Amino acid sequence: VQLQASGGGWVQAGGSLRLSCAASRVTFVIATWAWFRQAPGKEREFVAAISRSMTSTYYADSVKGRFTISRENDKNTVYLQMNSLKPDDTAVYYCAANREWSAGSQSPNRFGSWGQGTLVTVSS
């Protein structure tokens, strides 16, 4: 499977961005879609995840109430709506897909399929 992320860019604090990630050459049913991010000099961290049924979503505490993850199964696409952005949200954002679902915060080690990353820069 190949994942292509898009939608990153530069935005002022308080602004919004919507990230998208589309899968192609899909060889398995994507049970879990997730977003991670990595800021300069920091480890990759979990941002949000969503189940295939869309009845379960999980968010990092740092983004709860500001970010919303969604998906379109027929398009093999996941989205991340980011509102009220802060400078601390500046990072490269990565989408990831897994054929299995597990509840709660996701570890990057569980994912074998990754997008190339899209840069989000939030200025103060």
Image: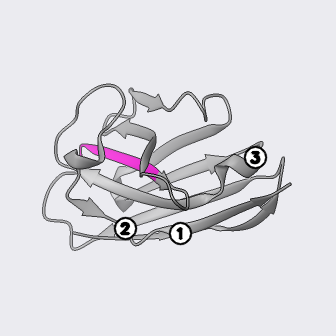
Q: Which tag, 3 or 2, sits closer to the chain's start?
A: 3
Question: How packed is label 3: few (under 14 Cα within 10 Å), some, or many (20 or more)?
Answer: some
Q: In this view, does 27 lie to the left or right of 41?
A: left
* Label 1 sits on residue: 118
Write down the region rendered in magenta: 31-36
Where residue 115 is drawn, which disc sits there?
Answer: 2
Q: Secondary structure under badge 1?
A: strand
- What is the three-letter code of the residue carrying label 1? Thr
Q: Residue at x 44, y 60 (%)?
A: 94
Image quarter hosting the C terminus: bottom right
Measuring from the top left, give residue 14's x and y in whole percent.
84, 47
Q: What element carries label 2?
A: loop
Residue 24 position by quadrant: bottom left
* Residue 34 falls left or right of residue 93: left
Q: Which quadrant is home to the N terminus?
A: bottom left
Q: Residue at the front extreme?
A: 41
Q: Earlier in the sequence, mark 1 or mark 3?
A: 3
Q: Is residue 119 above or below residue 19?
A: below
**What's the residue type where badge 3 is placed?**
Lys
Q: What element carries label 3?
A: loop
15 inside magenta stretch:
no
Compared across the picture, whether 89 is left or right of 76 comes to: right
Give residue 25's position: percent from left, percent from top.
21, 74
The disc label shown at residue 86, or none: 3
How far, Cα to Cα, is label 1 from label 3?
A: 17 Å
Q: Write down the quadrant of residue 120 in the picture.
A: bottom right
Identity, as a three-letter code, of the amino acid under mark 2: Gly
Label 2 near label 1: C-beta < 8 Å?
yes
